[in-house]
Image (cartoon, helix red, strand yellow):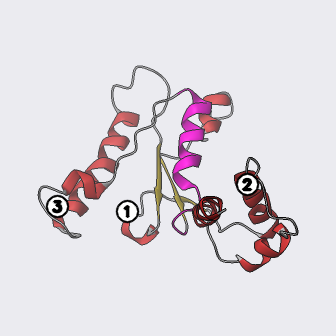
Amino acid sequence: MVLPLLMPEYFQGIRRPWRGVLMFGHPGTGKTHLAKAVATECGTTFMNISCSSLLSKWSSTESDMSRWVKSELLVQIDGVNNSNNTSSKPATLLAATNFPGSLDKALRKRIYIPLPDFKSRKELIERNLKSIMLAPGLDVEEVARRTEGYSGDDLTNICRDASLNG
């Protein structure tokens, strides 16, 4: 999290940063990109780890093993914060998921990452097409209106496909 690293004086006494933060929302809304940005801003390491990749050689579905891995990860993060953490910087787990119910309730701080609104969709479309020669009369606002419910990833793919057909 940005706050514990940029404002250590704020987290004194009873104030403690969250041990775990869960970003959730539809696929393609940029949760992983936000996590990378936070890690970069904080000068920390970003590791993109999925439980399914950790468990792929043992199980292809949600199982007792995958629940154990999730729980163990949270226990270990908690242990880093409570034991011999010599760095004086707390460890915070920043997780992103499309399925918030699949993670332990220990990630008490949850942040919903919504689908882009009209203004954001229009801006994403304009950014994706800025280096492309557009057909005369293309109404980007109309495209943004017609793509309600689309994620940022969806819009990028549409723009990519359209640019290849031009």
**Tally of numbered discs:** 3
The answer to if 37 sits in the magenta stretch is: yes
Q: Nearer the viewer, residue 132 or 69?
A: 132
Circle 1: element type: loop
Residue at disc 3, secondary structure: helix
Give the residue number, with chain letter if any, for mark 3. Answer: 65
Neighbour class for label 2 at 10 Å: few (<14), some, many (≥20)? some
Mark 1, residue position: 104
Residue 156: x and y, percent? Answer: 62, 59
Residue at 51% across / 50% down in the picture?
32
The residue that label 2 is drawn on is 129
- Numbered tag placed on residue 12 in the rendering: none
Magenta: main secondary structure? helix
Relative side of 86 to 150, left or right: left
Residue 131: x and y, percent? 74, 47
The residues bearing labels 1 and 3 have C-alpha atoms spaced at a distance of 14 Å
Number of other residues with Cα within 10 Å of mark 3, as a class: few under 14, some 14 to 19, many 20 or more: some
Looking at the rendering, the stretch of residues picked out in magenta corresponds to 26-43
